[in-house]
Image (cartoon, rainbow, N blue to C red):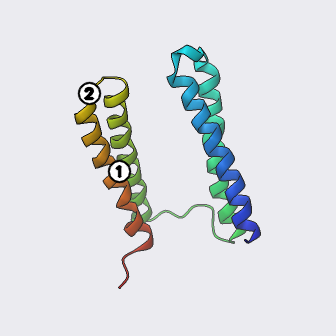
Amino acid sequence: MTKKDFISMILGAAGLMLFALGMCMVLLPEWNARTQGIMLGVAGAAAMLSTLLVRRAMEGKPLFSFDAKVVMRVALGLVGVLILGTGMCMVMVWSMLVPGILVGIVGILALLCLIPAFIGLKE
């Protein structure tokens, strides 16, 4: 394992755990920790963003590169995440089980479209 892979793995895992714990704190009213959850979620998101920036710096690439392809990939990812999140809310908050599952599947399919968008299709 290379040094950049190890550092990316550690930073990414820490960021994801902070973000997930923060979201649990916000979404579970029994915990009564909404403000602390928001702060923890923001810290996790910042750690994940720093993972991206550190990884690109270690690879010697520019920190940001904007073109139409990058914008479309980000837009597809955002739309997929929002659709998946809406499906999760439909199931967990609004008690709409079957429609929520269907909306969630659509969101998962949109996110799966990111794989060929980033890697490409090869024969």
Q: Is residue 102 left or right of residue 67?
A: left
Mark drawn on residue 96: 2
Residue sticking out furthest to the bottom? 123
Q: Is residue 78 left or right of residue 62?
A: left
Mark drawn on residue 40: none
Mark drawn on residue 108: 1
Residue drawn at 66 percent across, 54 percent down: 51
Instruction: Please tell me whether mark 1 sits on a helix, a strand or a loop.
Output: helix
Q: Is residue 19 left or right of residue 54?
A: left
Residue sticking out furthest to the front? 97
- Of the image marks 2 and 1, the number of the one nearer the N terminus: 2
The CA span between labels 2 and 1 is 18 Å
Residue 120 lies, with reference to residue 95, above or below; the image says: below
Residue 32 appears at what percent x and percent y? 59, 14
Residue drawn at 55 percent across, 31 percent down: 23
Residue 118 lies, with reference to residue 24, above or below; the image says: below
Instruction: Please tell me whether mark 2 sits on a helix, a strand or a loop.
Output: loop
Q: Is residue 98 left or right of residue 15?
A: left
Residue 96 picture quarter: top left
The residue closer to the viewer here, 43 or 28, is: 28
Q: Amino acid at mark 1?
A: Ile
Residue drawn at 60 percent across, 42 percent down: 45
Residue 100 picture quarter: top left
The residue closer to the viewer here, 24 or 7, is: 24
Q: Amino acid at mark 2?
A: Met
Residue drawn at 50 percent across, 24 percent down: 27
